Amino acid sequence: MQHTTDDIDELIGKYLAGEATAEEAARIETWEHASEANVRYMRQFRTIFDKACTVKTLQTFDTDAAWNNLQRKMRGQRGTTEAPPAKDNVRPLHAPAHRNLYLRIAASVLILLGVGYLAYRVTNTAEAIRPVTVVADGQTVADTLPDGSDVYLNKQTKLVYAYDKRKQTHTVKLKGEAYFSINHEDTKKFIVDVGDVFIRDIGTRFNVTAYEESNTVEVVVVEGEVEFFTKGDSGVRLQAGGKGVYNRATKTFSIEKPDSNVLAYKTRFFSFSNTPLGEAAAILNEVYDQKIVISKNIENCNFLLNASFPDDEIDEIAEVIADTFGLTVNETGDTLTLEGHGCNP
């Protein structure tokens, strides 16, 4: 059965007053749980009703006019423009008991409507701020979040940003790896949520590595400091130059020395110090589309690379490596193969 706005308001009043039949009560409960908007409207009506029950004195005035005014107010809160049906007759001043109870609701709404409307506006404003999603698949992605913070996503990364106006909290749900340069505000919190562990900004720039398939979550602070914690563990506080690691299996935190190439996916600046050639190639291959491959006859040679590459192209890097160790480069499609005569005895 379809109900009009007037039907619902009347039924709610009877329901809250304990005068609804079992069928009417069932209708109201079904209607209430049909949508979040109905839940909010019912919550507001209950608040008004509770306040109304504390009103001891009623002034003498047109009860139907007051009741219709209440309905118009409540419909206005729900964004409804439907006008109430016109009534030709006006009830006597001494209305039945349940109508007097409704009238107390109408009296109370004069006080509560402003508060209720404000709460309604705040709630709907918060809901209107939709989450923002940033995705990096095969390429890195740079973006600016709605709060002004800059983010740089590594490949295979997804970030979802949301802002809770009531809690004044910016939250980013992260899967993958991203660098954050936070537009810090002392009155607002910025938290990165990777599911089982959190990073809270304290005026900073930091990198988070949190791929779902990895057993660890890593945070490296470039500037400022962060809190690195879980719901059950206060974790560690990291300052500029610090690295924190959370082990998902053991649920423990540790502090380590940051790798010199942790931000290479963003800066394309690489620094290698006595780095085995195979390890260096793997680091480079995470950033560039073209891949460096070491041929079978030299893959076990003890080639240690000591070099820095400031945003060079991958083919240029391969040529420098080849010249360093007396190798050659064979380019085939997206593959740069380092070849040689084997290891020196």
Image (cartoon, rainbow, N blue to C red):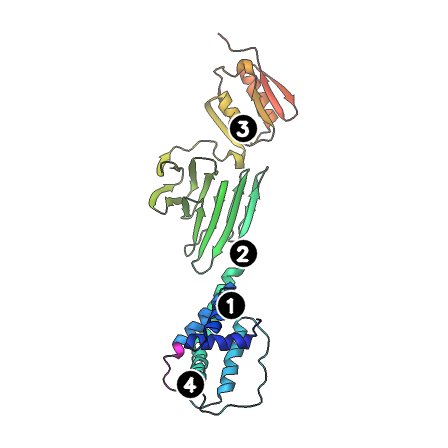
Mark 4: amino acid: Ala
* Residue position marked by numbered label 3 in the rendering: 284
Q: CA distance from mark 1 to mark 2?
A: 26 Å
Mark 3: amino acid: Leu
| Horizontal and vertical percent position of residue 204 | 43, 45
* Residue position marked by numbered label 1 in the rendering: 31
Q: Residue at the front extreme?
A: 22
* Residue position marked by numbered label 2 in the rendering: 130
* Residue position marked by numbered label 4 in the rendering: 97
Q: CA distance from mark 3 to mark 1?
A: 60 Å
Part of the protein shown in magenta: 51-58
Residue 115 shows in this picture: no
* Mark positioned earlier in the residue sequence (4 or 3): 4
For image coordinates 53% across by 50% down, the residue present is: 145
Q: CA distance from mark 4 to mark 3?
A: 81 Å
Labelled disc at residue 96: none
| Horizontal and vertical percent position of residue 217 | 43, 38
| Horizontal and vertical percent position of residue 112 | 43, 75
* Mark positioned earlier in the residue sequence (2 or 4): 4
The quarter holding residue 215 reads top left
